[in-house]
Amino acid sequence: MVELRHGCARGLQTAPYPETYLSSLQLDWVNVHLLIRSALPPGQLVKSVKAAIQSSNSDQAVFGVMSRDELIEDAVTEPRFHVFLIGAFALLAVAMVAAGNNDSLLQRDMRKRKNN
């Protein structure tokens, strides 16, 4: 299965919109994304696809080759980092509150000792 898509790097957060299949012979786009599903190992598939593209158009550059897993990982890296930061600051806030409560308990205990 081969699909040509324009603007494929929208990410996982955007809603999908209707798309249609168009032959690459009908359009001359500057940026074309080629998605391929195959039973071949990724390394072998990349070599085969690059060779096929180069045989049909030797001036065509092939770059940014990624597996589906790499594409998904790239899409979730930034949100995952934001969640990590929020968790770290929440943990810091809890530690500061706990330290503040311990400090106020110590001050209250010291005041009681002074009064006695």
Image: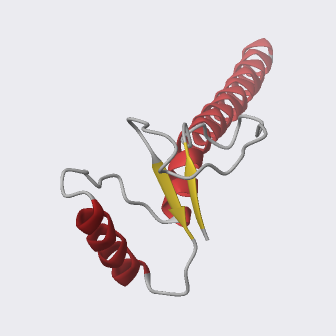
Residue 22 in the image, given as x and y percentages of width and height: 61, 49
Residue 45 in the image, given as x and y percentages of width and height: 40, 78
Residue 107 in the image, given as x and y percentages of width and height: 70, 19
Picture layout, residue 50 above or below residue 19: below
Q: 13 or 25, which is in the foreground?
A: 25
Residue located 43% across and 36% down the image: 29
Residue located 68% across and 33% down the image: 90
Is 72 left or right of 109, judged from the image as shown? Answer: left
The image quarter containing residue 28 is: top left
Residue located 76% across and 26% down the image: 105
Picture layout, residue 92 above or below residue 60: above
Q: 97 or 105, which is in the foreground?
A: 97
The image quarter containing residue 94 is: top right
Residue 115 in the image, given as x and y percentages of width and height: 79, 12
Q: 6 or 10, which is in the foreground?
A: 6
Residue located 30% across and 68% down the image: 50
The image quarter containing residue 62 is: bottom left
Quadrant of image for the C terminus: top right
